[in-house]
Image (cartoon, grey):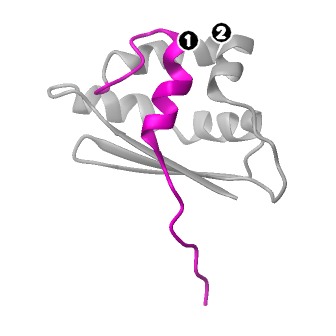
């Protein structure tokens, strides 16, 4: 199962945004904590696209639940929330709504 989402940096916050997100070690930890087998990140022009891959039948936890369990994740998300457009304003109660807005629907996944 693939899950993708995208969002943009606030104008003038692009460099801070990319610095916060461009950390493969943290990406690996988050993937493992969510139950994903893959965490792919695309960055450019103040936008990010992230794709998680989960095993078939997996029921991944949410970032909100992960943040409530891990203070480091919570702090990271708070740092990120102030540099993104239409974010969750440092409020974990609105993080699920933000993730719904930022999620992309899988149109197709073809392989040759």
**Quadrant holding the N terminus:** bottom right
Of the two numbered discs 1 and 2 in the rendering, the one whose residue sits closer to the viewer: 1
Q: Secondary structure at mark 2?
A: helix
Q: Position of residue 76 (x, y in %)?
A: 51, 18
Q: Quadrant of residue 102?
A: top left
Near-viewer residue (87 or 107): 107
Using the image, determine if residue 5 lies above or below residue 67: below
Q: Position of residue 85 (x, y in %)?
A: 28, 27
* Residue at far left of view: 12
**Quadrant holding the C terminus:** bottom right
Residue at (61% x, 83% y) in the render: 111
Say if the magenta span includes residue 29. no
Residue where numbered disc 2 is placed: 71
Q: Position of residue 99 (x, y in %)?
A: 51, 33
Residue at (39% x, 12% y) in the render: 89
Picture disc at residue 57: none
Using the image, determine if residue 54 lies above or below residue 70: below
Say if the magenta span includes residue 104. yes
Residue at (46% x, 28% y) in the render: 98
Report, in whole angstroms, how far the alpha carbon at label 1 lies from the one at label 2.
Answer: 15 Å
- Rate crowding at label 1 as few (under 14), some (14 to 19) or many (20 or more) other CA atoms within 10 Å: few
Using the image, determine if residue 51 lies above or below residue 94: below
Near-viewer residue (63 or 105): 105
Residue at (33% x, 30% y) in the render: 17
- Rate crowding at label 2 as few (under 14), some (14 to 19) or many (20 or more) other CA atoms within 10 Å: few
* First to last magenta residue range: 84-112
Picture disc at residue 93: 1
Q: Quadrant of residue 31?
A: top right
Q: Which is more N-terminal, label 2 or label 1?
A: 2
């Amino acid at each position: 199962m693939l899950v993708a989402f995208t969002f943009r940096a606030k104008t003038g916050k692009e460099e801070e945004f990319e610095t916060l997100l461009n950390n493969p070690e943290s990406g690996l930890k988050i993937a493992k904590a969510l139950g994903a087998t893959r965490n792919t990140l695309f960055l450019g022009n103040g936008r990010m696209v992230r794709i998680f891959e989960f095993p078939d039948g997996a029921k991944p936890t949410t970032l909100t639940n992960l943040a409530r369990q891990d203070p480091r994740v919570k702090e990271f998300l708070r740092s990120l929330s102030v540099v993104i457009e239409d974010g969750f304003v440092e409020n974990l109660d609105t993080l699920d709504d933000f993730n719904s807005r930022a999620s992309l629907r899988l149109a197709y996944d073809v392989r040759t």
